[in-house]
Image (cartoon, rainbow, N blue to C red):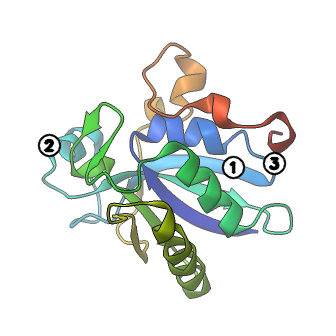
Amino acid sequence: MKKIVIAGGCFWGVEAYFSRLKGVISTEVGYSNGSVRETNYEEVCKGTTEHAEVCEINYDNRLISLDTILEHLFRFIDPTALNKQGGDTGIQYRTGVYYYDIEDREIALHFLEKQKERYQDEIVVEVDEVQNFCKAEDYHQNYLVKNPTGYCHVNLGLLKPNEMK
């Protein structure tokens, strides 16, 4: 089993998308790569802690690769949008791939390098080691399951039936 942290805008949709993928064992939304160890939704929304809204993904790398996870990320984000996805704007909505395993850094950087030819504008997806990750409040976990009419910039219709659990 492996673990990666993905920032793709509002974490509600990111979690809803990845939790449906074959090979994904579990997901948990939280805040990562900010300037302090602990934070909460209110502080993150103010932008004072510089955390991104993220989804930690535990996955079986025998069933799904990190490359495939990143391909899915690029289905629903605009990798050239700085601190913005969909209707959400702010540093907490930046895009990023945050790794625990140094080998995943190289995989992510290689993936981004291959993507450059597909975009005219610069890709602004961060690649960095996980820092200051903390779990989001319980009401954010599986938010779109609990609130199916909640706002989500992520198009869950991009998932193909054969990719889903």
Between 99 and 30, the one nearer to me in the picture: 99
Q: Which mark is residue 65?
A: none
Q: Position of residue 164 (x, y in %)?
A: 80, 39
Q: Is 1 placed left or right of 34 in the picture?
A: right
How many neighbours does mark 3 have within 10 angstroms: few (below 14), some (14-19), or many (20 or more)? Answer: some
Q: Secondary structure at mark 3?
A: loop
Type of amino acid at the residue the image marks with label 2? Lys
Q: Which mark is residue 46?
A: 2
Circle 3 or circle 1, nearest the eye? 3
Q: Which mark is residue 26?
A: 1
Report the residue at 28% width, 40% height from top: 41
Report the residue at 12% width, 53% height from top: 48
Q: Position of residue 24 (x, y in %)?
A: 74, 52
Between 88 and 142, the one nearer to me in the picture: 88
Q: Label 3 belongs to which residue?
A: 22
Name the quadrant of the C terminus: top right
Q: Is 134 placed left or right of 61 in the picture?
A: left
Type of amino acid at the residue the image marks with label 1? Ser
> CA separation, marks 2 and 3?
35 Å
Q: Position of residue 108 (x, y in %)?
A: 54, 75
Say whether disc 2 or disc 1 marks the residue closer to the N-terminus.
Answer: 1
> CA separation, marks 2 and 1?
29 Å
Circle 2 or circle 3, nearest the eye? 3
Label 2–label 1 contact, CB within 8 A: no
> CA separation, marks 3 and 1?
11 Å
Q: Is residue 2 above or below residue 68?
A: below
Q: Is residue 36 above or below residue 137?
A: below
Q: Is 164 placed left or right of 79 in the picture?
A: right
Q: Position of residue 20 (x, y in %)?
A: 72, 39
